[in-house]
Amino acid sequence: MPNKLDEFRSYRTRMNARISEIDHLGIKRFFNLDTAAYKDEALDPKTKELLGLVASTVLRCNDCIDYHIIQCIEAGWEDAELYDALNVALIVGGSIVIPHLRHAVETIDTVRDEQAAGRQ
Amino acid sequence: MPNKLDEFRSYRTRMNARISEIDHLGIKRFFNLDTAAYKDEALDPKTKELLGLVASTVLRCNDCIDYHIIQCIEAGWEDAELYDALNVALIVGGSIVIPHLRHAVETIDTVRDEQAAGRQ
Amino acid sequence: MPNKLDEFRSYRTRMNARISEIDHLGIKRFFNLDTAAYKDEALDPKTKELLGLVASTVLRCNDCIDYHIIQCIEAGWEDAELYDALNVALIVGGSIVIPHLRHAVETIDTVRDEQAAGRQ
Amino acid sequence: MPNKLDEFRSYRTRMNARISEIDHLGIKRFFNLDTAAYKDEALDPKTKELLGLVASTVLRCNDCIDYHIIQCIEAGWEDAELYDALNVALIVGGSIVIPHLRHAVETIDTVRDEQAAGRQ
Amino acid sequence: MPNKLDEFRSYRTRMNARISEIDHLGIKRFFNLDTAAYKDEALDPKTKELLGLVASTVLRCNDCIDYHIIQCIEAGWEDAELYDALNVALIVGGSIVIPHLRHAVETIDTVRDEQAAGRQ
Amino acid sequence: MPNKLDEFRSYRTRMNARISEIDHLGIKRFFNLDTAAYKDEALDPKTKELLGLVASTVLRCNDCIDYHIIQCIEAGWEDAELYDALNVALIVGGSIVIPHLRHAVETIDTVRDEQAAGRQ
């Protein structure tokens, strides 16, 4: 049965394909630049994904949080490290961040369940 | 001659002392919690200061950027690494972040000048 | 079958009626002022609706995006022009805007489908 | 039949329990500090809950709005007073707040219906 | 010698006069609506000014904070009550609010100094 | 005598040169993409600069407002049209935008004074 994260993933894939089809040069170049920002340069990709997660959390965007949690876990961050990063976001952003903390913890659990079920 | 960063530092020190004097339990406990968030736990303090810098940048707060740049440089981050983190913040936050990128780069230069002058 | 946009439209109509029923003078006057802001004055309504769409997008409010897309299409903006305006919003607001870009493109497609089906 | 507010309440309860289980000292202390901020000190809890509602509304967080509406009604605020506070939030925050005003009015109605049905 | 608050007051007075001169109907009506929002209705003006202060603080606008502190003190709020309201704003908005807390406390002190000097 | 806008212009020029010197590929590409977003495509540059002004105003960034006002006036927008666009931003963004409306009107006046003095 598809979980909430699956719905996000399929919606994201479908709409990104649709945006690509629109073929607006500026939008396409921004998407490339966005991908490039997390590549290995002065900082390694693992560190950068954690930066992306904290930025997404203080800006309170659940879809962005989901995306960066998936990337962070793929990059090798442990749950305790993710919680510690989310705590920084919580302190910087305040109680208005709490609903997004709930969402982030739920998503971490979902990805770990998927891993346990051999899905990733 | 005091630079802009010195003005921030002396204002910050003076007003934090004044806030401490007010003696509001909730405010004091929040300040302690804020300090504690960057201590060594699952993540090390160096990584956490970089998270703080990116969070401050996407939320567009120059005073917070200054504070975290000082902490990041003390923690040992190189300029190229700070620029790479600021690039993540720029991509996440967009062109509205550019004035704060200018401010951040100016502050990095000021702190390095102070170091070269033996001030730190 | 009602689509997501229909749900938004019926919810919006129902709750605006409920808010009107509450009869708070300040709220009613603000709603009137909001409507008036997009009327023909120094700028024409078509230009103003595009301003409303970009403002809604950088502030990341899907309901507001939907409302202004409907208005923009009624005012005669072409899809390519809407995409170009959304690109400005994306560059100003950064990657945190991407989930709202996906939503905006989906809504444009829905309104065009409705037009093709003779619904508008 | 569970309404939207029931879904929020059960999700909030379940995920707060999960966050508590995670046992991150900083997060737990922040949750305690958040609860303490609305206790009787120089200001009474009733006034503070209204401050929390307005802060949540201008920051445009529906879950936070729901939480503070429940607290405000328990604290004894009348609907007309809540609408008047929401009007302040609307004027401060502008038309981008309107979708959250709709949500807030719906939640007030839901809580009143629950009270009429003897649920609270 | 004019303090920082005097500079804000004279700038505000001068530019509001200039905006009035521009004579844009929508802008003028919004300014009237803004003033009206803090008048005696279901809530009293004293409570509303405190709501305005907290909204301004979580939205991190120093000019708005200064304006509402002046109004709050005229309305009769004590310093301890203002600090308690600012603590709610700090908890809701997080450490990113701290620079504005420093500003708010400085402004409260300035207004009290003016009162002691018989200026208000 | 240099006005406030001159200070912004010289600071902006100096720090953009410094950022260019840093030579971070991602940052440089983002600056190019930002410039490109306002070029003639489906929408003309004049319309796009107005979109940039409204986006900057609702996001409450004075430096960005100044930049886009200069561009808007060069593109041929009349003062009455700029005020009408700022009114849309005011209604969307609320009273928290007022300090930035004051700043925007001051900058429009400064640019017009410079034009009258033959500086532009």
Image: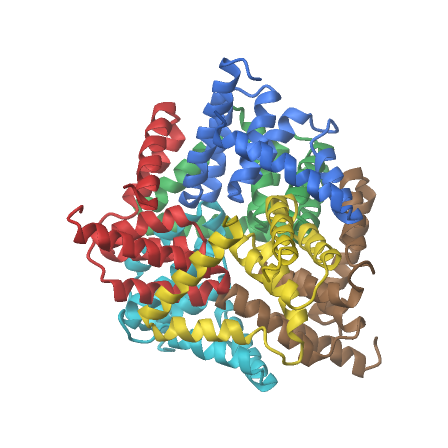
Chain colours: A red, B cyan, C blue, D yellow, E brown, F green
Q: Is residue E8 visible?
A: yes
At horizontal 56% and vertical 48% (from top left) the residue drawn is: F59
Q: Quadrant of residue A85?
A: bottom left
Residue drawn at 71 percent across, 54 percent down: D83
The vertical placement of D64 against E77, above or below, is above
Residue placed most toward the observer, E12 or A85: A85
How far across and down, in percent of the image, does residue B4 sit?
51, 68
Residue located 81% across and 49% down the image = E32
Nearer the observer, C13 or F21: C13
Query: Which residue in the rendered view is the most extreme toward the front?
Result: D118
Query: Does B27 sit left or right of D79 as displayed?
Result: left
**Residue at 34% of width from left, 53% of height from top?**
A52
> Where residue A15 appears, x then y in whole percent?
36, 31
**Quadrant in which the N terminus of chain A appears:** top left
Question: In this rendering, would A118 be left or right of B31?
Answer: left
Q: Residue A23 placed where, x, y %?
A: 36, 24
Q: Nearer the viewer, residue E50 or F13?
A: E50
Q: Is residue F59 above or below residue E57?
A: above
Numbered circles on residues, count: 0
- Report x, y in % for residue C47: 63, 27
Q: Is residue A55 left or right of residue F107?
A: left
Left or right of C110 on screen, residue F51: right
Q: Is residue E101 visible?
A: no
Residue sitting at the far left = A118
Question: Residue E80 is drawn in which quadrant?
Answer: bottom right
Specify the quadrant of the image occupied by residue E53.
bottom right
